[in-house]
Image (tube, rainbow, N blue to C red):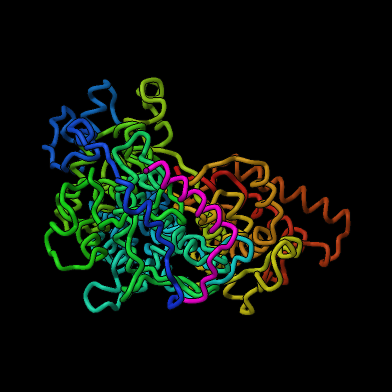
């Protein structure tokens, strides 16, 4: 009988495929239910075992005691004890502290995504107080740049863009409001438990005034013009469920959309029970109507198990539930029963008995500060991935993070004020242990030294603007479209990139540039910014000739070099000559005598060459706002020096 029914179902699916349902509005929706399948198909799941629950990520978070160490004078806080105990076990000593200029540059890029100014550097270097470094940390954490820097990390996870993607890539008029909400939440130091909850159920919690936060759930790519709007909703819900599982829980639940997960204890029914949490917040829309915020609906399509993930094969109705591996309780059995499934799920995300959420977020913050995570796959804690390098440290940080009210700035303080973070990334003078560290800890898994890291695309652009004095101090609002090469604009549909009319907007921070899925700003694309078609937990770090070619030849780089040359000319003094000032602005250090000599020699040689060619001003790249009394060939040579400095590896890397 079952075989006969499945054969009838296959025939029915084939017929429906020839005549797709045309949906014109929610009131016209009548979901096709295959009653023969619905009544006779039984959803079977493999029971979870003690071995499943014994995986490190699914054990309860506990607060381990600080380990005993021999070099008791080195740790500055608790996390250092865990790092040092492993180093001592490997018979290694930590590297000494980096010098102040290196520390401030590292700290500034990490916390606000910008280099320190010469004034900030001078103030820090002259501050003899014992807590001088800690006060720099506090200063940076209060700046609006903190939210802009850490907001961008979250927007990667949220697959944020201001367009739909796919062929037409239509603009989402209000998408920027979510970006501004994220930045504001970080700057206000919103506790992470509330931050997470609002993105799941901001329309339901409290007075519903934070509904904009739920745009996280609907930020993925969308095809509003698809004929079958039931299929559109199905795809939207599946993508949303997969993203929520990966971002907040570190579970790749999306692998169970069509079948049980091949390796992790996540069944297909787990996937659709989690998806059922969101069913009431996602309506079927009219064609071309945009999805924006989740909103509780009245009459809704019932949540179902979809056979093989096919939206045309409706299986049994299914109840909303937490993933079994993370919670033995059903939503109806959880505390605060009476909430909607979405509000209950939001509350459960940050309950003390949830083993995943705190671990996942602590690891994300750690990875951004050190260039590697305590576990290497931030959005996947599954069985096939490596276990944490320092499991006790991970649990200590996770438990302390919760005990301190899910305070992200507290977490940053713990990390950046630690002796571990403050280690030098280059061999200190007279350090006899350096070669042993490289030999015994070649990948720096034990954190025996600092990590040298390349800046991300946004920080490279923002640093160029800051160093050259061009960075605009305006925030928020719809994304800005700076000028693009005409040949690039021609690859888009008409009107998809219209340069913002106000020139000052073109030099705003990168987080405010218009985020289009089908076209990334050129500098962002070559330096590995994700395309926002999927949640991105770890960006690529490629090295290609295109990067050097773009930086050296782009309009932005030349414009920045001309501004920088003008700034150097105006700011230099007898106590700080031009070359010294240039290096302080760009690299947060003074030049060596060899570097000074080579630049002076280049300027003189370039001057003589340009003079011999007798170039007119129209054929020279001169500084903006140039002093009329300055030799124009010397000035043009300075622009070339500034362009070289902006292209130097030292501009792109942090020690």
Relative to the observer, which residue lies in front, 269 or 116? 269
Residue 545 shows in this picture: yes
Residue 217 is situated, as x and y percent measured from the top left of the image, at 39, 63
Q: In which quarter of the image is residue 349?
A: bottom left
Residue at 72% x, 70% y is: 629
Is residue 595 shown above or below 174? above
Left or right: 274 in relation to 352: right
Q: Quadrant of residue 564?
A: bottom right
Residue 180 in view, yes or no: no
Q: Which of 272 and 293 is in front in this view?
A: 272
User: Which image quarter holds the N terminus?
Assistant: top left
Magenta region, main secondary structure? helix
Q: In this view, does 425 lie to the left or right of 135?
A: right
Numbered-mark total: 0
Q: Residue at x 27, y 21 (%)?
A: 90
Residue depicted at x 70% and y 48%: 549
Give the magenta-colored segment's residue range.
1-25
Q: In this view, does 548 lie above or below 497?
A: above
* In this rendering, position of residue 641 left or right of residue 405: right
- Residue at the extreme right: 613
């Amino acid at each position: 009988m079952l075989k006969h029914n499945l054969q009838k179902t296959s025939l029915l699916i084939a017929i429906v495929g020839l005549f797709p349902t045309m949906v014109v509005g929610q009131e016209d929706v009548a979901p096709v239910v295959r009653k023969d399948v619905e009544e006779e198909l039984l959803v079977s799941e493999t029971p979870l075992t003690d071995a499943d629950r014994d995986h490190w990520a699914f054990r309860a978070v506990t607060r381990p005691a600080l380990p005993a160490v021999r070099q008791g004078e080195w740790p500055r806080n608790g996390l250092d004890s865990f790092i040092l105990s492993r180093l001592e076990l490997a018979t290694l000593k930590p590297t000494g502290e980096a010098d102040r200029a290196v520390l401030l540059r590292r700290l500034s890029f990490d916390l606000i995504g910008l280099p320190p100014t010469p004034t900030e550097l001078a103030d820090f270097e002259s501050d003899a107080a014992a807590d001088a470094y800690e006060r720099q940390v506090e200063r940076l954490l209060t700046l609006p740049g903190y939210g802009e820097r850490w907001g961008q990390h979250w927007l990667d996870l949220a697959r944020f863009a201001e367009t739909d993607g796919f062929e037409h890539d239509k603009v989402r008029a209000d998408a920027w409001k979510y970006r501004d909400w994220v930045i504001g939440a970080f700057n206000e130091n919103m506790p992470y438990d509330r931050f997470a909850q609002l993105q799941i159920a901001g329309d339901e919690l409290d007075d519903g005034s934070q509904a904009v936060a739920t745009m996280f759930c609907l930020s993925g790519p969308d095809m509003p013009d698809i004929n079958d709007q039931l299929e559109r909703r199905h795809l939207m819900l599946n993508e949303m469920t997969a993203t929520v599982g990966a971002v907040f829980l570190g579970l790749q639940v999306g692998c169970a959309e069509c079948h049980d997960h091949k390796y992790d204890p996540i069944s297909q029914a787990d996937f659709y029970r989690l998806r059922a949490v969101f069913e009431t917040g996602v309506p079927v829309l009219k064609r071309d109507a945009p999805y924006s915020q989740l909103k509780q609906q009245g009459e809704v399509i019932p949540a179902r198990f979809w056979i093989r993930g096919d939206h045309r094969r409706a299986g049994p109705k299914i109840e909303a539930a937490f993933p079994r591996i993370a919670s033995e309780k059903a939503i109806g059995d959880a505390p605060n029963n009476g909430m909607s499934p979405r509000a209950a799920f939001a509350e459960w995300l940050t309950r003390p008995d949830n083993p995943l959420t705190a671990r996942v977020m602590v690891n994300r913050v750690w990875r951004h500060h050190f260039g590697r995570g305590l576990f290497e796959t931030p959005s996947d804690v599954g069985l096939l991935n490596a276990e944490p390098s320092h499991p006790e440290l991970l649990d200590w940080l996770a438990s302390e993070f919760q005990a301190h009210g899910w305070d992200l700035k507290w977490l940053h303080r713990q990390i950046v004020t630690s002796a571990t973070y403050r280690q030098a990334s280059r061999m200190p003078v007279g350090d006899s242990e350096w070669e042993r560290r490289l030999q015994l800890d070649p990948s720096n898994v034990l954190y025996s030294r600092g990590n040298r890291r390349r800046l991300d695309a946004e920080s490279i652009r923002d640093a160029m603007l800051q160093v050259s004095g061009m960075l605009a101090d305006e925030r928020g609002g719809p994304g800005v479209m700076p000028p693009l090469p005409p040949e690039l604009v021609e690859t888009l549909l008409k009107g998809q990139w219209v340069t913002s009319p106000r020139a000052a907007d073109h030099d705003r921070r990168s987080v405010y540039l218009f985020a289009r899925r089908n076209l990334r700003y050129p500098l962002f694309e070559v330096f590995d910014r994700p395309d926002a078609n999927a949640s991105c937990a770890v960006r690529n770090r490629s090295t290609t000739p295109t990067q050097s070619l773009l930086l050296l030849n782009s309009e932005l780089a030349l414009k920045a070099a001309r501004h920088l040359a003008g700034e150097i000319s105006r700011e230099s003094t007898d106590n700080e000559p031009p070359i010294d000032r240039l290096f302080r602005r760009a690299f947060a250090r003074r030049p060596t005598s060899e570097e000074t000599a080579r630049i002076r020699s280049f300027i003189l040689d370039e001057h003589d060459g340009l003079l011999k060619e007798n170039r007119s001003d129209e054929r020279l790249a001169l500084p903006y706002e140039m002093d009329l009394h300055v030799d124009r060939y010397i000035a043009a040579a300075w622009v070339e020096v500034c362009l070289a400095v902006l292209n130097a590896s030292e501009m792109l890397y942090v020690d």
